[in-house]
């Protein structure tokens, strides 16, 4: 494999990685924006921990008891 091909493959891989990371970040921002909109529309009577429960890193339990 010559140097030109290697540089092309490396640049393509870097561009693909950057595109994937940017799309994941945009998806995360969109999801967070939707959740915050739900909380804002719920009013002050609804507790914040109902929409965003505490998470523990125990295997088998995904939410706080």
Image: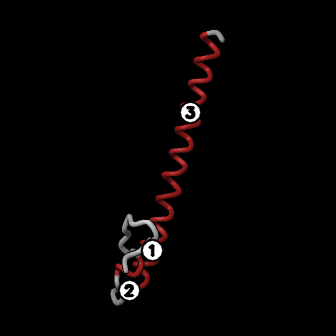
Judged left or right of residue 65, residue 13 is: right
Q: Residues within 10 Å of mark 2 (few under 14, many from 20)?
A: few
Q: Position of residue 47 (x, y in %)?
A: 34, 84
Marked residue nearer the N-terminal end (2 or 3): 3
Secondary structure under the numbered disc 3 in the rendered image? helix
Which residue is nearer to you in this view: 58 or 34?
Answer: 58
For the residues labelled 2 and 1, the Cα–Cα distance comes to 10 Å
Q: Residue at x 43, y 82 (%)?
A: 41
Judged left or right of residue 9, residue 65 is: left
Q: Residues within 10 Å of mark 3 (few under 14, many from 20)?
A: few
Q: Position of residue 38 (x, y in %)?
A: 46, 77
Residues at marks 1 and 3 touching, judged by CB atoms closer than 8 Å: no
Model colouring: secondary structure
The circle drawn on residue 37 is: 1
Q: Position of residue 33 (x, y in %)?
A: 45, 66
Q: Quadrant of the C terminus?
A: bottom left
**Residue position marked by numbered label 2 in the rendering:** 43
């Amino acid at each position: 494999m010559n140097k030109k091909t290697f540089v092309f493959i490396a640049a393509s891989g870097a561009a693909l990685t950057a595109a994937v990371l940017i799309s994941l970040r945009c998806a995360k921002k969109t999801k967070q924006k939707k959740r915050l909109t739900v909380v804002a529309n719920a009013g002050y009577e609804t507790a914040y921990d109902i929409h965003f429960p505490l998470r523990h890193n125990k295997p088998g339990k995904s939410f706080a008891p």
